[in-house]
Image (cartoon, helix red, strand yellow):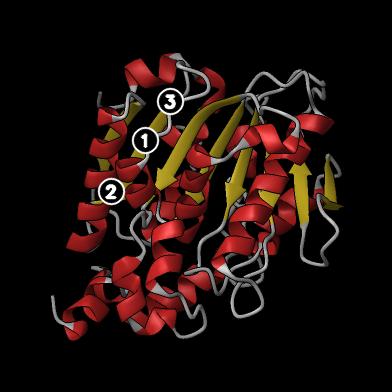
Amino acid sequence: MSKEELENQYSPSRWVVRLGAEEALRTYSQIGNEATCPFLETATKRAQATGRNLLDVPYGDGEGEKLDIYFPEAVSEALPFLVFFHGGYWQSGSKDSSAFMVGPLTAQGVAVVIVAYDIAPKGTLDQMVDQVTQSIVFVQKEYPRNQGIYLCGHSAGAHLAAMMLLANWTKHGVTPNLKGFFLVSGIYDLEPVTHTSENAPLLTTLEDAQRNSPQWRLKTSPAQPVDPACRVLVTVGQHDSPEFHRQSREFYQTLRRGGWKASFEELHDVDHFEILWNLTQKDYVLTQVGRIPSLWTECVLL
């Protein structure tokens, strides 16, 4: 594939069907900001205003290593936790505008954790993966009686969540109670991205890309699930680019061959950005963590 075609394939805004590329990017950047999207009932600022949260909680020593925790009405130590990692090609996005799915989840008794990590150029891919690992260790240690930790990420956030399938928890002194992964329109093989303009702030080498590619890592050195019951749902939008479709389907197939309980779903009539709006809907598959494990048999293509 030529460099020009790679640039096209890995530019999600070029594949939107209802908005122009610039408008799609502008709309996406406004998600969670009630000043510009007042109709979002579950926007970040409203979630922060409920009072049932802990904001800017340090999970590490770094300035950017903080997370927000949103609790349901009935606070308990024995809650399921959904941990969300924002997208933005590892170079944009913030936890401070990524809590738009909180309402539907806390209404079902799920605690939601939104994680910040150091994006490029300040942070490298290795640092981001390490920070995400630290954040999960923190949640497990702080809430050891949790009913399960579910990881969810969009785009670059899905990549970071997927890297946790390969984490060496032993060296962290705790094995998190991971019950499910929700990977939304992710990139799992980073090598093609190194040939696009998106790599300019990342400065990712081929070695870096391979070390931080869950697709490549799982194919060359398969990792077995710590918990055989842990599920992985790989989703992609119907109007995502062909490369995003290929990456999602091939990663799903790699997981299945490796013995993971993986499922794949193409979400109808949404693009790379619109897929996030579904996270604000109470009946959407990814906002029904409280119904697991029945969710997997009722709503997911097995």
Q: Position of residue 184 (x, y in %)?
A: 40, 48
Q: Nearer the viewer, mark 1 or mark 2?
A: 1
Name which residue type carries label 1: Pro
Task: Give the residue number, with chain letter if any, for mark 1.
Answer: 222
Residue 146 visible:
yes
Where disc 3 sits, the SS reads strand
Q: Position of residue 186 (x, y in %)?
A: 38, 54
Among the two numbered marks 3 and 2 on one chain, the one whose residue lies closer to the N terminus: 3
Q: Which residue is located at x 45 percent, y 38 percent? A: 182
85 left or right, relative to 24: right
Residue 254: image quadrant is top left
Q: Is residue 62 above or below residue 264?
A: below
Q: Which residue is located at x 45 percent, y 75 percent? A: 204
- Gap between marks 3 and 2 measured at Cα: 15 Å
Name which residue type carries label 3: Arg
Sort mark 3 into few (<14), some (14-19) or many (20+) by Cα contacts within 10 Å: many
Q: Which residue is located at x 33 percent, y 74 percent? A: 13
Residue 12 visible:
no
Along the line of sight, the residue nearer the viewer: 96 or 100: 96
Where disc 2 sits, the SS reads helix
Pick the quarter of the image with the C terminus: top left
Task: Give the residue number, with chain letter if any, for mark 2.
Answer: 248
Task: Give the residue number, with chain letter if any, for mark 3.
Answer: 231
Sort mark 2 into few (<14), some (14-19) or many (20+) by Cα contacts within 10 Å: many
Q: Are marks 3 and 1 in contact (CB under 8 Å)?
A: no
Q: Are marks 1 and 2 in contact (CB under 8 Å)?
A: no
Q: Which residue is located at x 66 percent, y 24 percent? A: 80
Q: How many marks?
A: 3
